[in-house]
C-alpha cells in the first residue's frame, strides 16, 4: 500500500526538513566552493614532494596559511577522491581559490612536475645543458653561461674558471623550469657530499689538489668506459707525471674540437692550447668533463705498475706497455686490426 509523503510529515515538519537540507547544501557550498584568501604574494609557489602523503600536504598548506581549515580540506579531499591522486610538482597557487579548485590543481595541474635527470659519467657542461633543457625545461644557454660565471662559482666557495668536473654524475629528481642556479647548486652539492674529508686526505697523499684529481679523473673517463681498467690507465698517467713526461692524452685534444669527438689527425695534435697535453707537460688547466665516482676513485687509487704507454686493443680495452718499443708493437697490432675491420 503506497504511502504519500505528505502523510509522513506535517507542513511544519516539512519546512524543518527543507530548511535543514538547504542549510547542509549551503554549508557545503560555503565550505568547499567559496574562496579562501591568504595574506601572501600571489601566485604562491608550493611544492609537493615525491612520495609525500596527503596528510603532510594538508599540514603544510595550513602551516603556511594557504588554507584556513585542515579538517575541511581533508573532507574536500575525500569527496574529490584526491588523497592518492595529488602529484609531486611545483605549483603556482592563485589567491582566493576554493578547496575543490585547489585539489583540482594538485590532481590535474598545470604545474612544474618532478622529473628524473641523469648526469652521465663523463658528460660535459655543454651536453648537460642540452639535457636539462630537454628533460626539465631549463634554459640551456643560461645554464652553460652560469656554469662559467666567476661570481656564481665564487659563491659556491670555488676558485676555478668553470664548474666542469664539479657536477657529480647521478640521477636527480628535479622540478620542471628549475632555475639554472638551483640546478647547478644541486649538482655541485652532490659532489661535495661525495668528496669527503677522507678523499681530500687521499688527494694530498698522491700529491694532487682536488681540482687536479678531477682533471685527471676526467681524462681517465675520456679514455675508457671500462671500470676495470681505469686504475691501470690512472697509473700510466701518474707514472708520466712523476717523471715529467707529457701525458699525450687524446681526450684533451677531443675536448678542443668544436665539432665533437672524431678520429684525430696529426694536425689536431698541433692545436695551440694549454689543454693540448701533446704540447704541454703536466695536467691541463682543468677537467674536460664531469667524471663519475669510478674515474675519481681511479685517479685517487691508481694501480701499482710501471706502464708508461697504452693503445686501444681492438674489440675492447687497451694494451699496456712499459717500453716504447713494446708500445710500437701494440700500435702495429691495433692498426692491423683497424685495417681488417675496413675490408
Image: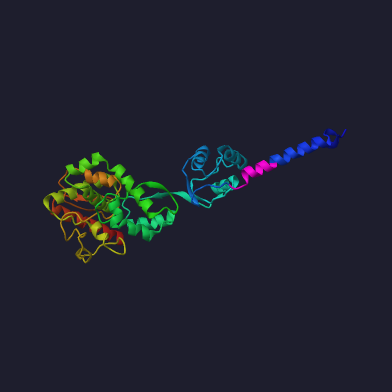
Taking the image as shown, residue 304 lies to the left or right of residue 223, namely: left
Q: Position of residue 266 (x, y in %)?
A: 21, 65
Taking the image as shown, residue 283 lies to the left or right of residue 147, namely: left
Q: Is residue 265 above or below residue 43?
A: below
Taking the image as shown, residue 179 lies to the left or right of residue 337, namely: right
- Residue farthest to the right? 1
User: Would you identify the image quadrant in which residue 127 lies?
Assistant: bottom left
Q: Position of residue 225 (x, y in %)?
A: 30, 50
Q: Is residue 53 something one can see in this rendering?
A: no
> Which residue occupies 77% across, 36% down?
16
User: Would you identify the image quadrant in which residue 4 lies?
Assistant: top right
> Which residue occupies 18% across, 43% down?
204
Q: Position of residue 19 (x, y in %)?
A: 75, 39
Q: Is residue 12 something one can see in this rendering?
A: yes
Q: Is residue 36 above or below residue 1?
A: below
Query: Magenta segment, which residues?
Result: 25-35
Amino acid at each position: 500500500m503506497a504511502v504519500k509523503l505528505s502523510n509522513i510529515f506535517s507542513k511544519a515538519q516539512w519546512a524543518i526538513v527543507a530548511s535543514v537540507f538547504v542549510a547542509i547544501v549551503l554549508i557545503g557550498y560555503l565550505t568547499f566552493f567559496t574562496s579562501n584568501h591568504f595574506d601572501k604574494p600571489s601566485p604562491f609557489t608550493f611544492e609537493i614532494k615525491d612520495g609525500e602523503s596527503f596528510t603532510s600536504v594538508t599540514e603544510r598548506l595550513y602551516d603556511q596559511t594557504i588554507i584556513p581549515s585542515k579538517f575541511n580540506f581533508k573532507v574536500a579531499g575525500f569527496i574529490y577522491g584526491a588523497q592518492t591522486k595529488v602529484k609531486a610538482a611545483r605549483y603556482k597557487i592563485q589567491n582566493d581559490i576554493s578547496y575543490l579548485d585547489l585539489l583540482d590543481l594538485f590532481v590535474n595541474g598545470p604545474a612544474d612536475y618532478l622529473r628524473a635527470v641523469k648526469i652521465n659519467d663523463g658528460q660535459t657542461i655543454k651536453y648537460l645543458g642540452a639535457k636539462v633543457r630537454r628533460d626539465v625545461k631549463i634554459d640551456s644557454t643560461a645554464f652553460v653561461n652560469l656554469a662559467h660565471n666567476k661570481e656564481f662559482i665564487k659563491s659556491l666557495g670555488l676558485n676555478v674558471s668553470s664548474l666542469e668536473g664539479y657536477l657529480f654524475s647521478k640521477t636527480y629528481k628535479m622540478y620542471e623550469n628549475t632555475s639554472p642556479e638551483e640546478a647547478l647548486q644541486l649538482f655541485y652539492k652532490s659532489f661535495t657530499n661525495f668528496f669527503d674529508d677522507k678523499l681530500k686526505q687521499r688527494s694530498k697523499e698522491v700529491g694532487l689538489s682536488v681540482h687536479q684529481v678531477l682533471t685527471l679523473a676526467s681524462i681517465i673517463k675520456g679514455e675508457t668506459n671500462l671500470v676495470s681498467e681505469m686504475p691501470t690507465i690512472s697509473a700510466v698517467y701518474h707514472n708520466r707525471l712523476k717523471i715529467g713526461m707529457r701525458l699525450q692524452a687524446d681526450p684533451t685534444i677531443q675536448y678542443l674540437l668544436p665539432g665533437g669527438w672524431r678520429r684525430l689527425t696529426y694536425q689536431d695534435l698541433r692545436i695551440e692550447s694549454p689543454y693540448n697535453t701533446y704540447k704541454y707537460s703536466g695536467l691541463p688547466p682543468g677537467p674536460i668533463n664531469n667524471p663519475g665516482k669510478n674515474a675519481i676513485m681511479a685517479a685517487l687509487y691508481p694501480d701499482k705498475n710501471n706502464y708508461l704507454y697504452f693503445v686501444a686493443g681492438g674489440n675492447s680495452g687497451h694494451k699496456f706497455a712499459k717500453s716504447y718499443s713494446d708500445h710500437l708493437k701494440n700500435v702495429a697490432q691495433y692498426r692491423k686490426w683497424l685495417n681488417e675491420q675496413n675490408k
